[in-house]
Structure formats: C-alpha cells, structure tokens
Image (spheres, helix red, strand yellow):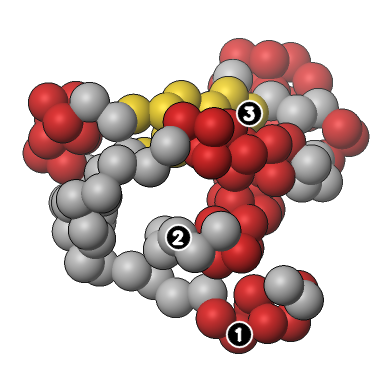
Amino acid sequence: MEIWEAIKQRRSVRVFTEQAVDEALLMKLIDAARWAPSAGNFQLWHFVIVSNPGQLRKIKAFAPGMCGNPPALIVICTDQVIAEKKGGRLGRDVITLMDSAIAAENMALAAVEQGLGT
C-alpha cells in the first residue's frame, strides 16, 4: 500500500468487531511505532499490549474517551523520570507527548495497511 493511500484511508474507528487480533500483528504495529522519530533519539516510550477482556473493561472504566470495545489495545507509556532527567520539564511534559503521538500515528498507518481500524 502506498503511504498516501494509507493516510487517506485511516479513520477513527468507534465500532470494532470481536475478532481477536493476532499477537504477531500487534507486535508488527509496535515495530512501526519503534521506528518513529524521537526527540534526541531518547525513545522513552514503552508499549503494552492488552487483550484480556477483563483488563480491557477496567481500562475503559477510567478512559471515557475510548470509544467502542476494541479486541486489543496497545498502550503507550513514557518514562517521565528519565524524560525529566534528559530534557527537563520540556522533555517530561511536551516531548514525551509529541514522541508518543508520532509513534501512535505510525501504528495507525501500519494498522490501515494490515486492514485494521484504530
């Protein structure tokens, strides 16, 4: 798939099927995220796959912006302590968010290529 095609096809999905997503495919999406640019090449992100229905329900309970019931999540976490040590408050409060957003977009575009909605 051409990158422009993936950009144009990407949508914010709010209704998901119950079909499980293969863990190898989820790992491929994480690999796409790992290739995202990172300020200072710090790469302070961590990715957590959640596919257990009970854990997904718990996350949805405190994440009101999460629409639908996806069969899996890839949660992006950042190490705020190291971010502050390396980049001060700017690193902790801004750069980690920007880096995570770029990684998320890489995952979203890779998901489109694999026929998945995000």
Q: Which residue is denoted by mark 2 in the rendering?
A: 116
Q: Left or right of 24: which side holds 21?
A: left
Rendered location of residue 85, percent (x, y): 74, 15
Q: Nearer the viewer, residue 91 or 39?
A: 39
Compared with 68, 77 (above or below) is above
Check disc 2: other Cα within 10 Å, few if <14, some if 14-19, many if 20+: some
Identified at 19% across, 50% down, the residue is: 18
Rendered location of residue 95, percent (x, y): 69, 42
- Earlier residue among tags 1 and 2: 1
Q: Nearer the viewer, residue 82 or 72?
A: 72
Compared with 90, 105 (above or below) is below
Instruction: Give the amino acid type for the residue marked by disc 3 in the picture.
Output: Trp
Q: Which residue is denoted by mark 3 in the rendering?
A: 45
Identified at 41% across, 63% down, the residue is: 117
Cα distance, mark 1 to mark 2?
14 Å
Disc 1 element = helix
Instruction: Give the amino acid type for the residue marked by disc 2 in the picture.
Output: Leu
Q: Which residue is denoted by mark 1 in the rendering?
A: 8
Q: Nearer the viewer, residue 83 or 1?
A: 1
- Earlier residue among tags 3 and 2: 3
Q: Nearer the viewer, residue 89 or 109?
A: 109
